Amino acid sequence: MPQALADACSQHLESQIGAEPQALSLFEADAAGTSWQIEAYFASADEVAETARHVQALPDAAGLTIIVEPVREADWVRQSLQGLGPIRAGLFFIHGSHDRALRPCHAIAIEIDAATAFGTGHHGSTQGCLMALDALLRTNKPKRVIDIGCGSGILAIAASRALRRRVLASDTDPEAVRITAANARLNGAAVKAIVAAGTTHRAIAAAGPYDLILANILARPLVQLAPAIARITGSRGHLILSGLLTEQGRWVASVYQALGFVFARRFEEGGWATLVLRRG
């Protein structure tokens, strides 16, 4: 259907009928962008019939083709988990609870199920941080470590397990802090998770200065936090920074270099860059 009609149908489905779709998507049906398609999922055949009647009453509905197909029975949870296979990043083996049997003997296995906080190990920025952490720990044994913007806690857990030390983790989202604490208990990691914005929380100040700061957030927050992160970094401390598109890496590195950090290494995975910097 034409884009204007597709937009009208989509808005109508979302707001003007009683049978609300459980899921709705609108996308181009051809490369030229002249034909558009809507997919909507409903709980019952009655809702489908009601929706079809409403849509067919729209102006210009003569250009519509409505196709109704039942959704086949499937174990959707199992299928979604199959798309989240284990990840190997250097010393670390990240897996869901459905892949416990695959844990290798000579690796630090960390169990993280998809939940309401970012970080299952599958994102390029998370993989980059894990690879950077693995490489750094081959030559350095930081004592004071913090994970800023911890999400699911995967990086804090990895650092704690590898170093056998207590790691501080912070996030602005209380739900992320809750998930981090739960994941740390599950994986036998010594992680203290707190709700904090930036670096001003008294627990962060009390535990510093830090030998290693992990921050997998986004480029702009990393730039905004640069002076604060510099203040809590120890004299020989390292930073592992990510959440950066590959083209943003140079910008972020230059900001930290202006604050006295030296570029050490860069990892790239799936269009995302991870930077390793150290105090000059």
Image (tube, rainbow, N blue to C red):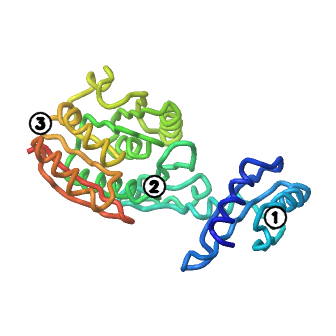
Residue at mark 3: 235
Mark 3 crowdedness (10 Å alpha carbons): few <14, some 14-19, many ≥20: few
Q: Position of residue 131 (x, y in %)?
A: 32, 58
- Where disc 1 sits, the SS reads loop
**Front residue of this view, candidates 238 and 256:** 256
Residue beneath the point at 41% across and 52% down? 108
Seen in the image, is 195 located left or right of residue 204?
right
Query: Residue 73, which numbered label?
Result: 1
Q: Secondary structure at mark 3?
A: strand
Q: What's the amino acid at mark 2? A: Gly
Amino acid at pointer 3: Ser
Q: CA distance from mark 3 to mark 2?
A: 30 Å
Q: Badges 3 and 2: C-beta atoms under 8 Å apart?
A: no
Give me the residue at 51% from left, 43% from top.
Answer: 117
Where does the image place residue 87, in percent across and percent down from the top left?
46, 61
Residue sitting at 25 percent across and 54 percent down? 275
Which label's residue is closer to the chain start, 3 or 2?
A: 2
Mark 1–mark 2 distance (CA, rounded to whole Å): 30 Å
Q: Is residue 96 left or right of residue 233?
A: right
Callout in the foreground (1, 3): 1
Q: Nearer the viewer, residue 192 or 15?
A: 15
> Above or below — where is 93 with respect to 194?
below
For mark 1, does the 10 Å Cα neighbourhood hold few (<14), some (14 to 19), or many (20 or more) residues? Answer: few
Q: Is residue 174 above or below residue 121?
A: above
Image quadrant holding the C terminus, namely: top left
Disc 2 target residue: 121
Figure quadrant of residue 128: bottom left
Density class for disc 2 (Cα within 10 Å; few <14, some 14-19, many ≥20) is many
Q: Residue furthest right?
A: 46
Q: Amino acid at mark 1?
A: Glu
Asked whether 86 or 243 is in front, the reply is 243
